[in-house]
Amino acid sequence: MLAADHQRDELLARRPLPALTFLALHWQIELDLRTLIPLRGLIELRLWRCALAGGLEPLRDLPALTAFTLLHSQGHDNPIDLRPLLGLDQLTITLTGDMPLIGEEHFAPGRIIRRR
């Protein structure tokens, strides 16, 4: 688990990282998911209390990703748009809290798990 932006940046600056399969980020401010694109072998991503600077589109570039969890994260007072993840049929999304979402209704039952 990485607790600070500089720790994340240092980790991502190291090469090679394609073998990394699990990543948990905690308290990331202005998290830009494009920084994770080099992690092509990433299977599971957990974001705890992260403020997303952009959308979820970069996750489409992680072909091995099968589990994505947002724990009490937010998208700058805007709903989090899940629609960019629609084509990732192997992906299960787990959410906590009452974060507002866009596109949840387009996912098959069981693909989105909400925990309160």
Image (cartoon, rainbow, N blue to C red):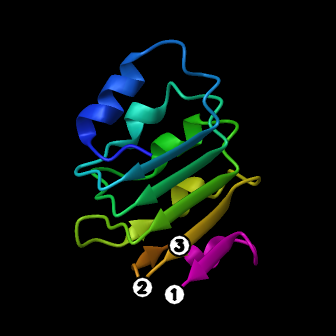
Mark 1 or 2, nearer chain start: 2
Residue 37, horizontal then vertical, whole percent: 49, 30
Secondary structure under tag 2 reads loop
Question: Is 12 drawn above or below residue 29 in the view shown?
Answer: above
Q: Mark 3 points at which residue?
A: 95
Callout 1 secondary element: loop
User: Marks 1 and 2, how far apart in space?
Assistant: 7 Å
Numbered tag placed on residue 116 in the rendering? 1
Q: Which residue is drawn at 40% across and 42% down?
A: 33
Q: Residue 98 carries which label?
A: 2
Q: Nearer the viewer, mark 1 or mark 2?
A: 1
Magenta residues, as a range?
Answer: 103-116
Report how far apart the C-alphas of labels 3 and 2 lie in the structure: 8 Å
Q: Is residue 54 left or right of residue 92?
A: left
Within 10 Å of disc 3 (Cα), the crowding (few <14, some 14-19, many 20+) is: some
Q: Please identify the quarter of the rendering in which residue 11 is found.
A: top left
Whether residue 114 appears in magenta in the rendering, the answer is yes
